[in-house]
Image: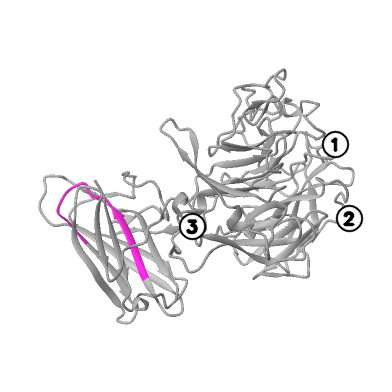
Amino acid sequence: MKRRVFLAATVALAYCLAPSALPQELTTERVVSGLSSPVALVGHPTDPTILFVVQQRGRIRVIRDGVLLGVDFLNLSGVVSQGGFERGLLGLAFDPDYAANRRFYVNFTNTAGNTVISRFKRSVGNPLVADPGSRFDFRWGGPQGPRWIAQPFSNHNGGNLMFGPDGFLYIGLGDGGSGGDPGNRAQNPFTRLGKMLRIDVSVPDADPEGFAIPQDNPFVDGNPINALHEIWAFGLRNPWKYSFDDPALGGTGAMYIADVGQNRWEEIDYQHAGEGGLNYGWRRWEGNELFSGGTPLAYGPATFPIHVYFHSGGNCSVTGGFVYRGLELGCNTFGHYFFADWCTASIWSFKVIINKAGDPVRTEFTNRTAELAPGGGLFINSITGFGVDANGELYIVDQGGEIFRVVARRPLIFPVSFSILRGLLMSGELEDLLKCDDSRLVVRTAVFAPSSDPPVQIEVVGTSPTETPSELRFRFEGMASRILIERRISLYNYVTQSYEELHVGFAATSDEVIEIVITSNPSRFVEPGTGQVKSLMTWKAAAFSFFTGWYVGIDQTIWRITPE
């Protein structure tokens, strides 16, 4: 059983509660207004102060430090379709090697109504302005193929672009439009419509097609069926936004696809990291319900959604979002996938856990509408997308011309700056430890590191949002595989310029939690000018043992700071 050791100067501790037990803890703040039909927001790959807004009729705008700049990043108004509710400039993605190669990619419907995927480069002289002369349109079907993907109708263009954790570009295409997929394109292996594509864009500028086919794409070997080699998944109706749970921020790499339904059901599809070749079932299935029972699948079995919702209360069209992996919203939000309905501006979130059979299970479903789209001065009415910045903080795109940021209500006790923790072992380096890690009580390679009698030391550094907190809270979870292990926990005192020891004890063989609360001059542990907070944890064997080694480590370390 888990032991708890409390070191507190005042009142009882605050815990991360389950979402169902929490009051409203999030809200929204307007970042900018005055946009024209924004449909996507993409963060700069490395700079969290810069955001790019995709406007449907062809302009990509820049927000820097919360200010909408007057100069466009790129203006494609002359080549983008200006008609059709679902046509236009729809997607933007920055190359994983953007800092070096300056490449980015856009998805738009041209004036003929067909889908074009284009590569551009940012300009050399101004990083916030693209070079329009660098445009290269991908060719499809070979070096002499067309520079577009034909669209038979004006709707269901998809339009999103995202790079996966594998470095490949994913392109989501709708079924070609009309209603009910009359051409059964989503199950046709020789059309790109109704599919998720996956391509390798790391080719030379002179490559005639602009991309190559990854050799591990699921249909390259003709199994289970012969199909276009760029296809990654079948059976999509209109994937209006998909995203990956970013491993760089502590995510799993899983893919979430919001697929717009026909008449009754909206769905969120889930895909394990690297799991290609799935068939999501449209048009045989709409959600979990038969839509056209006489339509055979191109191959089976169908993969059913992880979440569906019905067209009730005005709901009509799902808008996909992101798994939150930022620093500012707290443990109760960390790992939640956010999404919305375009018609009602309802916003929800849920978390995915993997059961013992390896299957994804939806949990912690939460209706966020009252928190995030409450009406009044911050009325959000038509959510066309979500976005994240380089730090993983979450934004909402309102088609009416506004961008909102999701923020925590104040004052709150909240975890800060520990999206990634670095533990250093005297004899080597530990792997990164993640804020709000739910994988407690598990001996994981290099996290719980085997050691002999010499001390194990782990230093963890974070940043306070204020240099004058009213209190500082520190939570440590650890496990040892033998008794009589001396445990010391210290914080760095920036007044004395030395570590101040706050706790000495002995670790038990069972898992334990230690919590420290400091209300007497907590500012001495916050570095002036930087807000840095630093801890040092030391373990050593205090007695002889017949065991040749023991395990010790931290699963979760969270500083909680209550601003004044």
- Kindly state the secondary structure of the residue where label 2 is placed: loop
Q: Which label's residue is closer to the chain start, 3 or 1?
A: 3
Quarter of the view holding residue 557: bottom left
The disc labelled 3 sits on which kind of residue? Pro
Magenta residues span 472-487
Residue visible at 89% across and 43% down?
112
* Residue 417 seen from this side: yes
Question: What main secondary structure does the magenta stretch of the protein show?
Answer: strand
- Can residue 537 be found in the magenta stretch? no
- Indicate the position of residue 327 as horizontal and vertical percent values: 49, 61
Q: Is residue 278 left or right of residue 144?
A: left
Q: Earlier in the sequence, mark 2 or mark 3?
A: 3
Relative image position of residue 516 (x, y in whole percent): 30, 65
The mark found on residue 131 in the picture is none
- Relative image position of residue 328 (x, y in whole percent): 50, 62
Q: Is residue 114 left or right of residue 250?
A: right
Q: Amino acid at mark 2?
A: Gly
Q: Earlier in the sequence, mark 1 or mark 2?
A: 2
- What residue does disc 3 label? 23
Q: Give me the disc on residue 78.
A: 2
Q: Amino acid at mark 1?
A: Phe
Confirm whether residue 94 shows in the render. no
Q: What residue occupies the far top of the structure in this picture? A: 294
- Say if the magenta span includes residue 473: yes
What is the basis of the colouring in this image?
one colour
Q: Quadrant of residue 425?
A: bottom left
Mark 3 and mark 1 residues within 8 Å of each other at the beta carbon: no
